[in-house]
Every structure is written in C-alpha cells, then in structure tokens.
Amino acid sequence: MSIERVAIIGAGMAGLTAALAFARHGTACDIFEEVAALIEVGAGLQVSPNASHVLSELGVLPALEAVWTEPDRIALVSGTSLRPLAHVPAGRFARERWGSPYGVLHRATLQQALLAAVERNPLCSIHLDTPIRNDPHVTLAGITGRTYPLIVGADGVWSNLRAGIPDSPEPDFSRNVAWRFTIPGSARPDWLDAGQVTAFLGPSTHVVAYPLREIDGFNIVAIASGISPGKTWDAQAGDAQRRMLLGQFHRWDRRIVQLIERAERPTFWPLYHVAAGRWHNGRDMVLIGDAAHAMMPFAAQGASMAIEDAFVLANRVAGPLPLAQALTEFESERTQRIAKVRARGLFNRFAYHARGPIRLGRDIVLSLRPPQSLAADFDWLYGFKAK
Ligand SMILES: Cc1cc2nc3c(=O)[nH]c(=O)nc-3n(C[C@H](O)[C@H](O)[C@H](O)COP(=O)(O)OP(=O)(O)OC[C@H]3O[C@@H](n4cnc5c(N)ncnc54)[C@H](O)[C@@H]3O)c2cc1C
C-alpha cells in the first residue's frame, strides 16, 4: 500500500536514509530533528558492504567514495604482544566478494551526505530544532497542520516515540563504555598500519583503530568497563574516568597504553542496548535503527542495521500489503536479521575480551584460519542485499 506522506522523527542515519527510501517510492517525508544544526557528533564509522549497497541504491555512495577510505583488511592483533592474529581481506576483495565496498569515514561525513541528498529531494522537507515528545500526532499536527498515516521513530537509543508503542523495548546499560579520541596522521606510531582497520584484543577490553581521511588522522576507540554518565554521546573524560580506563590496560603492550595515556580530549559514551520488544503499534507508528534495537558495537553494525531497516521499511510500506500488515512483515523480517547480528556481536565480545586459557585457544584458532575462510564467515552479513 503506497502512502502519500510520512513523518520521520530524528535525522540520524536511520531517519535520513528512511526519507530517501520513502521518496524513491513517491512518498513525501517531513523529517523532525531536535537539534538546531547537524554538527559533528560521534566518531568514525565502518560502513560494511550490506550498508553501502543500500547507499548505492539511494544514490549517496559516490559522495562517500570521494572522501572515505577503503581499508585493505580488517585485522585482529594481540593487544598484549602486538602480534597479528588473523585478518579478513577488504578493499577490492570486498567489492568483488560482497558486491559493494567496505569504507571507513566520520559519522558526520555520512550524515552530511545523506542530508545533502535529502535537501536536494523535492519530496523531503526537514524541520531542525523541532523536538517531538509527548503525543506525536498532536505535536505534529500543531507544527504542520497535517495528520500522518505513518510516523517513523528514528529518534535513537533514547527514543521518545517508544512510549506510544505498547511492549516496546527498553534501553539497558551494558556496563561498557566506548572511549574515543583521534590522533593526527603525523603522530602515527609505526606499529599502527594506515591501510587497515585494526582490532587490538586484550583481556576484558579491546581497541579499534582506523584511518579517517577527512581529518588526515586516525579514529581510536577503546571499549572497556565503565559507569554511565547518563544520556550522552560525548561526555568529557575526567581524571577519575581516565584512571578507571587505564587500570583495565595494565596487562597490555606498553605502546598501546602510552597511546591511550597521551590521548588529547578523549570523550566517552555509555553503551546502552535495546533488546526484545515490539517495534510498531499495529497502526501508524514504527521504530527503526537504535530506537528499535541499539546494539553493542562489537560487530560494528549499528549504523548499517539502521540503514538496512530504513530501506526495508520503505519497500514494505510501498508493497501490496495494507499498512498494518506491512509493519508486521517489516518487524518480523528485521527482528530475525537483528537477532543474528546481535548474536555475532555477543560472540565477538566473548572472543575479543577473552582471558587466560580461552585467550590462548582463541589466538591459536585464529592464526590457523586463512583470510579467505574468515571472509566466508561474513557472507551472510556483508553479502546481504536489503530489498
Ligand atoms: C563506539 C561505537 C562505535 C560504533 N561503530 C559503528 C560502526 O563502525 N558501524 C556501524 O554501522 N555502527 C557503529 N556504531 C553504531 C551507530 O553509531 C548507531 O547504531 C547509529 O548511529 C544509530 O543511528 P540512528 O539514526 O538509529 O540513531 P542516532 O544516530 O542516534 O540518531 C537519532 C536522531 O534523532 C534525534 N532525536 C532524538 N530524540 C528526538 C526527538 N524527541 N525529536 C526529534 N529528534 C530527536 C537525535 O538528535 C538524532 O539526530 C557505533 C556505536 C558506538 C557507540
């Protein structure tokens, strides 16, 4: 059933992609975003082939390819010895095997590319500085004078729209925080390979590093235990938090510890996940992206899943089923995919943060796996073509 117009709450990856995906079917979109300007928030993002495929369908990929980096490989390296353990080839290999590129870039770059495409599209209009809380139907009617047959909640992990959906999922603190800082390219230590995404694995923590062309430097993220500073993406780290972080690296290679010690203006954000629950109200409201299923970044798939959701939702709503059934179909398809990705993330968490004998076993198993065989493990994830 095709609908004439939708309201989308939130202009993150999910909301902006949804606007482009709906517009492709001739549906007009009003997007409502609470911040007054979409400025740089967050850190680097890995965009895997399953997401770049969608971005290509929506015409956004060329703008990204002009500025991002396609890493040669995703490498797993011991955080205690800096010994390479295994790698999954990316670069040209990713394009050939999974039919679409694997790129790394700043979150703001992706958001600006999506925003530019939305602003160019005559069917889309964006309302910044317009938070939607309380009863969304009443609030939206007050702003635009319209009644919307469908409201899409793309308002992130702290979604307000969830309150209108019975049995919707609740965010839960994972007891892990993500630390983020950047270093300029000129400060790159010789053990940090500029051509790859590197995951350094250590007991109970891991560090991911990759180049960001936009800043001529590197994005570095450490995932460790921590306490939540509340609803934020960008808390400034004080001395107490720094000590807590560094305490978790005492068995790590000294060179990585020094890199973290010298980090300038590190920020951290608490990792909340949003697990099982309903994503729609059976009528006129549906959640996508982090609002529906925020996940830990162990598979680096949060934004990619938000992008897939947006595309699939627009396709189901434009399909032959009545709206309520299209929403049910969407939820059922997407919960299965999300469950698989979440399970992969949990497995990575177990493997990445392994200690003692499990860590030794992991290292042996990984070093015996040829890159092509590791790549085959990702076919279901990276080779997926959202429809
Ligand atoms: C450390 C870390 C590393 C990550 N790395 C990766 C990675 O490599 N690859 C990957 O795919 N994902 C990654 N992710 C996950 C990814 O960043 C998120 O999953 C993704 O940004 C979610 O997009 P979203 O649009 O659903 O939500 P958001 O990006 O949170 O956007 C929500 C938008 O809604 C707006 N909003 C909120 N409330 C309201 C309201 N009441 N009214 C109006 N607007 C509102 C917000 O201002 C915001 O603009 C990572 C996450 C972390 C924490």
Image: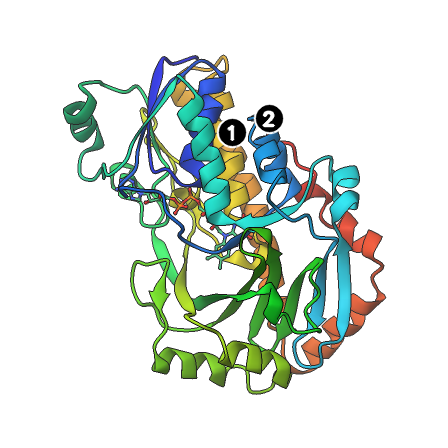
Nearer-the-camera pick, 332 or 356: 356
Is residue 306 among what the camera can see? yes
Residue 337 at x, y percent in the picture: 57, 41
Which residue lies at the image location 34% right of the left edge and 41% below the top edge?
155
Look at label 2 and name its amino acid: Glu
Residue 192 at x, y percent in the picture: 68, 69
Residue that carries the numbered disc 1 in the rendered image:
311
- 10 lies above or below 138: below
Which residue lies at the image location 51% right of the left edge and 68% below the top edge?
223
Residue that carries the numbered disc 2 in the rendered image:
57
- 206 lies above or below 81: above
Look at label 1 and name its amino acid: Phe
Q: Disc 2 and disc 1: Cα gap in Å?
A: 9 Å
Where is the C terminus found, in terms of image quarters?
top right
Residue 381 at x, y percent in the picture: 66, 44
Is residue 330 among what the camera can see? no
Nearer-the-camera pick, 119 or 130: 119
Asked if disc 2 and disc 1 are in contact, CB closer than 8 Å, the reply is yes
Q: Residue furthest front?
A: 186
Q: Is residue 92 left or right of residue 19?
A: right
- Secondary structure beneath dot 1 equals helix
Q: Nearer the viewer, mark 2 or mark 1?
A: 2
Q: Quadrant of residue 8?
A: top left
- 120 lies above or below 32: above
Q: Quadrant of residue 22?
A: top left
- Secondary structure beneath dot 2 equals helix
Q: Earlier in the sequence, mark 2 or mark 1?
A: 2
